[in-house]
Image (cartoon, rainbow, N blue to C red):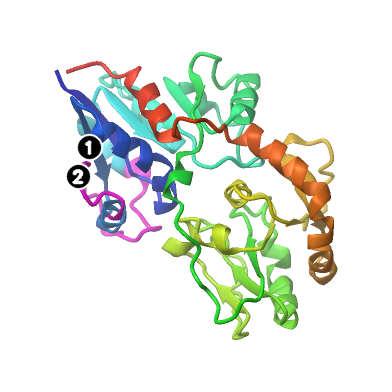
C-alpha cells in the first residue's frame, strides 16, 4: 500500500527551505509518494535545485500569470480553484496558515500538517486562531511549543518539537566582497510595526557609508513591501531586496555581526554565536516581553547614529552575550543526534494513512 503525501508550495520561496528536507526524506522511504503542488514554475525550478535525483513529483497548478520566486498568485484563489485536487490527498503539509481555509469545504477530510517556518520571537503570531485548526504542528524547539500551548493554539499531543531542518541545507559561506573586512548583515523585518526599515533604514545606510572599515549587507525580509527605496553606490554596501542569497543562509553564514529587529533569521545567524545589535526604532518598552526576548542577546540601539559605537563595542561585549545566545538557541531550536528532517518525516507519517 502506498502512502500519498502532498506538500503545498503556495507561499514565497523562502518558506520552501523549511519543508524541503522533510519532503526529500519522505520521498526516500519505501512505499511513500510525495507530490509538490505549486502555482509557480519559477518556484518549481528553485525546488528542483535541491532534488537532483527527482525524488519529488513536482506538479504545476496554474492559477494566473504571476510566476516569480516571491510573487505568486493569491493563495485564496489557488485554494479555491484546486480544492478538488487538494482533498484527494490523505495528508497535506504546508508552512502557511492560510491553507486552513481548506477545512471550510465540507468535502475536505484530509489531515493538515503545518511545519512552522522560522523560529522568531515576535513573529510567532499567538493571536492567530487558524493555528489551532491544524491536525499537527511541527516546531523547531521547546520555546515555540510552550508558547503555542499556553496561547491555546495547540496541545502537548499535536505540537511536536522536531528541530530546524533548514540547517541541513547550509552551504559554505561565499566571498561577497573583494576584501576581508568584517561583514555586518542588516536584516529588518517586513512588518512595519516590528521593522526598523521604515523609520531608520535610510539613516542606517547613510551611516554605513561612513564606516568604511566594515562591509554591510542590507537584506530586508523578502516580504517587506513599500517603505523607503534606499540605494547606495558605496563599495562597502551590498543591498539585496530579494534574491535566493537572501533566503538560503548565504548572508547569515557570511556575516560577523547581525543587525536587525525581529526577523527569525537571527536564529539562523546564531547557529554560530556572534555579536548582535538590535534596532529598537519604535522605542518599545521591550524588557520582560517574550516577543522581544531576543533583545537580551546583544546591544540595543534606537538611532542610526548609535551604530558606530555599537560596532566598536561588539567584539568586546560578545563574551557576556554568548552564554545567553547559546541558551536561547537551545530553547528555540532543539538539537538532536537525529536530523530534523527525519524527525519531521516520522511525525508526518504518524498521521498518514495508507491508500
Can the viewer see residue 132 in this picture? yes
In the rendering, which numbered label is found on residue 74?
none
For label 1, the residue is 35
When the figure is inspected, residue 126 is found, relative to residue 269, above or below; the finding is above
The magenta stretch spans which residues?
49-77
Residue 279, percent from left and from top: 75, 58
Mark 1–mark 2 distance (CA, rounded to whole Å): 7 Å
For label 2, the residue is 59
Q: Which is nearer the eye, 100 or 138?
A: 138
Q: Residue at x 59, y 47 (%)?
A: 271
Circle 2 packing at 10 Å, graded few (<14), some (14-19), many (20+), is: some
Q: Secondary structure at mark 2?
A: strand
Q: Which is nearer the eye, 238 or 26?
A: 26
Q: Residue at x 14, y 18 (%)?
A: 1
Q: Which is nearer the eye, 140 or 122?
A: 140
Magenta stretch holds residue 59: yes
Position of 43 compared to 161: left or right? left
Position of 247 compared to 128: left or right? left
Residue 118, percent from left and from top: 54, 42
Corner quadrant of residue 328: top right
Residue 325, percent from left and from top: 72, 44
Circle 1 packing at 10 Å, graded few (<14), some (14-19), many (20+), is: many
Q: Residue at x 79, y 67 (%)?
A: 311
When the figure is inspected, residue 275 is found, relative to residue 126, above or below; the finding is below
When the figure is inspected, residue 308 is found, relative to residue 233, above or below; the finding is above
Q: Hey, which residue is sitting farthest front in the picture?
A: 337
Q: Are marks 1 and 2 in contact (CB under 8 Å)?
A: yes
Q: Residue at x 44, y 38 (%)?
A: 96
Magenta segment, principal secondary structure? loop
Amino acid at each position: 500500500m502506498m502512502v500519498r503525501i502532498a506538500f503545498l508550495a503556495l507561499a514565497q520561496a523562502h518558506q520552501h527551505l523549511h519543508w524541503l528536507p522533510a519532503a526529500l526524506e519522505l520521498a526516500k522511504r519505501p512505499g511513500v509518494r510525495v507530490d509538490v503542488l505549486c502555482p509557480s514554475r519559477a518556484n518549481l525550478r528553485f525546488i528542483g535545485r535541491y532534488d537532483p535525483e527527482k525524488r519529488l513529483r513536482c506538479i504545476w497548478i496554474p492559477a494566473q500569470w504571476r510566476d516569480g520566486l516571491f510573487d505568486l498568485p493569491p493563495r485564496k484563489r489557488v485554494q479555491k480553484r484546486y480544492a478538488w485536487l487538494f482533498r484527494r490527498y490523505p495528508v497535506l503539509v504546508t508552512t502557511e496558515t492560510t491553507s486552513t481555509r481548506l477545512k471550510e469545504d465540507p468535502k475536505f477530510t484530509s489531515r493538515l500538517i503545518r511545519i512552522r517556518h522560522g523560529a522568531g520571537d515576535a513573529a510567532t503570531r499567538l493571536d492567530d486562531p487558524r493555528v489551532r485548526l491544524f491536525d499537527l504542528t511541527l516546531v523547531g524547539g521547546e520555546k515555540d511549543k510552550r508558547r503555542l500551548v499556553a496561547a491555546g493554539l495547540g496541545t502537548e499531543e499535536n505540537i511536536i518539537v522536531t528541530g530546524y531542518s533548514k540547517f541541513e541545507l547550509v552551504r559554505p559561506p561565499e566571498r561577497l566582497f573583494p576584501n576581508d573586512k568584517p561583514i555586518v548583515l542588516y536584516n529588518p523585518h517586513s512588518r512595519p510595526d516590528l521593522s526598523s526599515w521604515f523609520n531608520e533604514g535610510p539613516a542606517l545606510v547613510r551611516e554605513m557609508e561612513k564606516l568604511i572599515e566594515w562591509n554591510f549587507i542590507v537584506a530586508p525580509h523578502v516580504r517587506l513591501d513599500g517603505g523607503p527605496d534606499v540605494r547606495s553606490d558605496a563599495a562597502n554596501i551590498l543591498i539585496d531586496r530579494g534574491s535566493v542569497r537572501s533566503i538560503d543562509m548565504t548572508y547569515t553564514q557570511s556575516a560577523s555581526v547581525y543587525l536587525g529587529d525581529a526577523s527569525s533569521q537571527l536564529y539562523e545567524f546564531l547557529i554560530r554565536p556572534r555579536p548582535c545589535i538590535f534596532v529598537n526604532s519604535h522605542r518599545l518598552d521591550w524588557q520582560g516581553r517574550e516577543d522581544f526576548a531576543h533583545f537580551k542577546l546583544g546591544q540595543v540601539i534606537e538611532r542610526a547614529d548609535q551604530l558606530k559605537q555599537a560596532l566598536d563595542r561588539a567584539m568586546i561585549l560578545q563574551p557576556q552575550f554568548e552564554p545567553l545566545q547559546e541558551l536561547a538557541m537551545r530553547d528555540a531550536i532543539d538539537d538532536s543526534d537525529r536530523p530534523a528532517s527525519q524527525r519531521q518525516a516520522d511525525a508526518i507519517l504518524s498521521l498518514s494513512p495508507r491508500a
